[in-house]
Image (cartoon, helix red, strand yellow):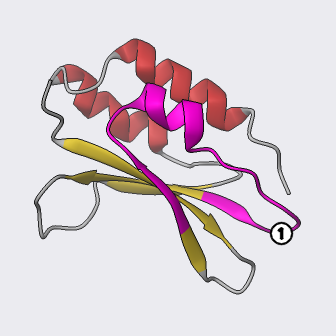
């Protein structure tokens, strides 16, 4: 299946600098490898983008709260681009991300 959406996973340092740790085309792939390992004051940032688009991201969410992620992803459930099960898996996984 051709994917039109992709996830970018980053580690963000306390000084604001970030390092991309992966790009993923599905929530299961993101969960398998994209939540990374953080140290000290580092945060995890996830972004959802449309492939081949010059527009900004659909959303960017940062640990520890990932505010608004579930609400934003519901619009993709209604268009069958993301399953409700995958949204639930992601929301549960990010809620379990340790706070640095």
Left or right: 31 in relation to 77 = right
Q: Is residue 41 above or below residue 84?
A: below
Residue depicted at x 20% and y 27%: 81
Q: The N terminus appears in which quarter of the rendering?
A: top left
Give the magenta part as a residue range: 20-44
Q: Position of residue 58 (x, y in %)?
A: 28, 53
Residue depicted at x 51% and y 19%: 88
Residue depicted at x 48% and y 45%: 68
Left or right: 13 in relation to 58 = right
Residue 24 falls within the magenta-colored stretch: yes
Left or right: 54 in relation to 64 = left
Q: The C terminus appears in which quarter of the rendering?
A: bottom right
Q: Is residue 98 above or below residue 58?
A: above
Question: Dot 1: what SS?
Answer: loop
- Which residue, as the protein is rendered here, is positioned at the far bottom? 15
Left or right: 95 in relation to 82 = right
Residue 54 falls within the magenta-colored stretch: no
Q: Is residue 94 above or below residue 85?
A: below
Q: Position of residue 35 (x, y in %)?
A: 62, 44
Mark 1 neighbour class, 10 Å CA radius: few under 14, some 14 to 19, many 20 or more: few
Residue, disc 1? 41
């Amino acid at each position: 299946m051709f994917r039109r959406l992709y996830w970018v996973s980053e580690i963000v340092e306390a000084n604001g600098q970030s390092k991309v740790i992966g790009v993923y085309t599905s929530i299961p792939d993101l969960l398998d490898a994209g939540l990374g390992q953080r140290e000290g004051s580092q945060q995890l940032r996830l972004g959802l983008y449309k492939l081949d688009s010059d527009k900004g991201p659909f959303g960017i969410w940062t640990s520890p709260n990932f505010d608004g992620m579930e609400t934003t992803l519901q619009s993709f459930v209604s268009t069958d681009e993301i399953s409700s099960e995958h949204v639930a898996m992601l929301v549960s996984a990010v809620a379990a991300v340790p706070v640095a």
